Image (cartoon, rainbow, N blue to C red):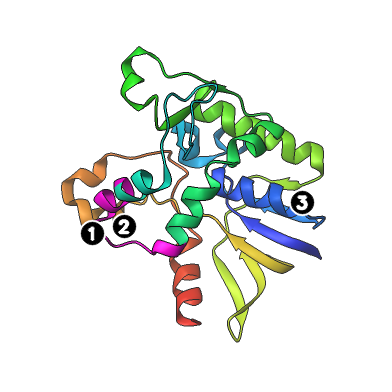
Amino acid sequence: MVDVLVIGGGNAALCAALTAREAGASVLLLEAAPREWRGGNSQHTRNLRCMHDAPQDVLVDSYPEEEYWQDLLRVTEGNTNEALARLVIRTSSQCRDWMRQHGVNFQPPLSGALHVARTNAFFMGGGKALINAYYRSAEQMGVKIRYNTPVQALELDNGEFVAALAGEERIVAKTCVLAAGGFESNREWLREAWDRMSAVNGQPITFSSAAPASIRACCSSL
């Protein structure tokens, strides 16, 4: 039995797997996609918005906490947990060092993106390079990775994780990180909000097959 089961194979899942492994836990990561499609829509990301108090290698001027917070409020229209949001904002100033330790490199913005040179640090090679760096580091650290393993449901006992159900297989672990929430290719979910625009998709594997039942199970236990 592994200590930590991570369900998902994108940026959030990989960061969770790497952090757990750094803490000494044994980790198994389940990615629904085949290896060549791994990473979900994280393959298409390109930068990280991060707080900083002074110019840095690829960031100009400063981007203080309060300005970041106000920018976030404008996007969420105030529907934001302030304590959690400020925690994320503050730790964003430190995460690039951690990312570099796992092979991620940064570059200044290209000419068409100079307007975000103060707020956003760009990944050299884009999202695919980011994902590949994290997978390479995870493999080197001993994280076990299984591709083509979509999870259909979670088994809970009084709200606590017991096992993940993947096809005919029941995978037990001491704890679980559910990081498979991407649903950019789930037209049924997109149609609820987008109607005809639901035909615009992301990665074809980003279907969140584990999410509907798992989210319902987890939410009902809270």
Q: Earlier in the sequence, mark 2 or mark 3?
A: 3
Query: What's the residue type where badge 2 is placed?
Result: Trp
Query: What is the C-alpha distance between the residues marked 1 and 3?
Result: 38 Å
Say if mark 1 contacts mark 2, CB within 8 Å.
yes
Q: Residue at x 65, y 65 (%)?
A: 176
Residue 32: x and y, percent? 57, 49
Q: Is residue 205 left or right of residue 20?
A: left
Q: Residue at x 77, y 39 (%)?
A: 139
Asked if one can make out residue 153 in the rendered structure from this viewpoint, the answer is yes
The residue beneath circle 2 is: 189
Q: Give the residue pinned by disc 1.
A: 192
Q: How many neighbours does mark 1 have within 10 angstroms: few (below 14), some (14-19), or many (20 or more)? A: few
Depth check: 194 or 19 in front? 19
Tell me, yes or no, if residue 185 can be seen here: no
Say what amino acid the circle numbered 1 marks: Glu
In x, y percent, where is residue 69?
A: 36, 50
Tell me the element at label 1.
Answer: helix
Q: Earlier in the sequence, mark 1 or mark 3?
A: 3
As displayed, is residue 123 above or below residue 188?
A: above
Taking the spot 44% from the left edge, 51% from the top edge, the residue there is 182
Mark 1 or mark 3, whichever is nearer to me = 3
Residue 216 lies, with reference to residue 80, above or below; the image says below
Q: Which residues are magenta?
A: 71-83
* Gap between marks 2 and 3 measured at Cα: 33 Å
Q: Is residue 40 magenta?
A: no
Residue assigned mark 3 = 21
Total marks shown come to 3
